[in-house]
Every structure is written in structure tokens, then in C-alpha cells.
Image (cartoon, rainbow, N blue to C red):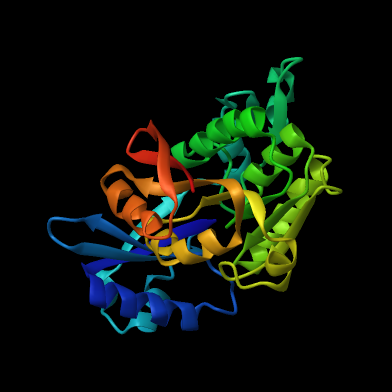
Amino acid sequence: MQIRYFIQGPKADAEAWYAALETAFEDEGSPLAITEIDEAKRLFEASAYLDVDEGDDRAADFAEAIGVAPDRVGREDLPDKDWMADVLAGLKPVRAGQFLVHGAHDRDKVRPNDLSIEIEAGMAFGTGHHGTTAGCLTLIGEEVRRRKPCRALDLGTGSAVLAIGLAKLARMPVLATDIDPVAVKVAADNVRENGVAGLVSCVEATGFRSGQVATKAPFDLIVANVLAGPLRAMAPDFARHLAPGGRVILSGILTEQRWSVLASFATQGLYHRRTLTMGEWVTLLLSR
């Protein structure tokens, strides 16, 4: 059975506990977590999910690893279940314009005119259920129909859901990059499973710093579902790698961050054309 052991305290303590737990349970490969549980009180929680024989208790191991008394350690017994199957069952198909993002368990939901993007919950970000992903897919559909781009970059591809959508809709070459090598592998697997391996290239890259980015630029369309901070910092790179008349679709941006992102891109000659709001998130369309 698996038991979640946890301890609560200030952020600095929780970070120190988390680091100690990483060292103590590294060989076991035990899942760890650090979570803010009370913003007003600035209270954080460090957890370890440990395998335990029936009737045993490893609170003392947890306590020893972080140097506290065992009576400070909380315990939560977890039911035996197929967690991945449970997650997949809760992921319903998502429609975004012409696209339907779904798992293998929902293939029967695909209609004749849908552009199907099959993505399983896994180790890379992007199953289509987040408002930022759905917002990007919606604007991608509009831009591809309106302008018919010939070459695209999906920066920070995650699961490659956006790159797959671009390739299926426009039948054009797409370069999909991510800073995380695990995400790149997952993205390549998803691209292959969706039948667009001949159109989408998945490469590891930090921002625009990649030989393949440099070789394939300029791009008619650059899509980046990242975060506001990195987007602001990379604004000059977007301008340098965008073809004349090209478009940029940005997301991972909270509504209150919209204006600071637009200001950073305006200084590079890239101006706001449209905002799509989904919940607390916005997706932006920009051009020269």
C-alpha cells in the first residue's frame, strides 16, 4: 500500500524538507510534493508518497529524513487504485473550433468533420483541457483558414497538441521545441501516434536558441503557450524569427498580465490584433 506522509510549515522550512526528502528517498523513486496550502498564513506542505507493507508505518523514516520528531508528521492512507485510469476517465473531450482533443478512451466521440488530436494524460503539459491550450487551438484554426501559413514554430510544445493541430489543419511543416527533454520525447510519441511525424519535428531547445530554429526561420506563424515572464523576455527573439506578414499567438498569460506582455511586444514592432479570454487566462494574437 502507499501512504502519504506530510509536514506543514513556512515556505523556507518546506523547501528544506523537500530537499532532504529528495536525498533520503531518491533510490526508492518515491513521488514527492511541495504545496502552498494557506496563502494568507503563508503555510506550505512537504509530502512523500511511500510504499509501506500492510500494518507497518514509516513516519519515523520520514521524520528522520527531515530532522523532526515523528509526532509532527501527518499521515494519509491512500486507496489502492489505478490512478492513471482514474485521471483518464475524468478527462472529457474538449472542442476548440474545428479541433477535438481527446484520449484514446473517447475515440467514439470524434465526428466526421472533426480534426482529432489524441493526447493521453502523461508526463508533458497539454491535454487540451487548460484554457490556454483551447485558446491557442481556436486562434490557430482562425489564422490558418484566413492566412494559410506555410511554416510554423510551436515554442514550448509540451505534449505537442498545438503542433499536431497545426500540422493536421494546414498540412505544413511545424517545428516543435521544448526545454524539457522528457516533454520532447512525449511530444515525438504523440506526433507519431497522430500520424503527422512527416510534418512535425520535435527538438530540445531553450527558447529560440537552437540550430534548427535558426535554419527553419523565418516563420509565418509562431505559437507559444508558455508563461508571461518568459514571453516578455523573448519578445525580441519573436520579432527576429517572424516572417514579414507573420502572426504570433501567445498564451499562458493571466488576464492581469495581458498589458505588460503587449507592451513588451509593441516595443519590438509586434502589435495587438485580438484577445481571446477563457476564464482567468487570455490568448493573444499579434502581428507587425
Can residue 129 be seen here? The reply is no
Can residue 85 be seen here? The reply is yes
Query: How many circles with numbers are drawn on the protein?
Result: 0
Q: Is residue 209 above or below residue 34?
A: below
Q: Is residue 60 above or below residue 226?
A: below
Q: Is residue 64 above or below residue 82?
A: below
Residue 271: x percent and y percent? Answer: 41, 47
Residue plotted at (73% across, 16% down): 113
Q: Is residue 169 left or right of residue 57?
A: right
- Name of the residue lying farthest toward the top: 112
Residue plotted at (30% across, 63% down): 45
In the rendered view of the protein, which quadrant contains the N terminus? Answer: bottom right
Q: Is residue 60 left or right of residue 54?
A: left
Residue 120: x percent and y percent? Answer: 66, 42
Residue 226: x percent and y percent? Answer: 48, 55
Of 178 and 13, which appears nearest the observer? 178
Of 186 and 256, which appears nearest the observer? 256
Residue 121: x percent and y percent? Answer: 61, 44
Of 260 and 64, which appears nearest the observer? 260
Residue plotted at (72% across, 32% down): 169
Q: Is residue 175 left or right of residue 136?
A: right
Residue plotted at (43% across, 55% down): 269
- Name of the residue lying farthest toward the right: 198
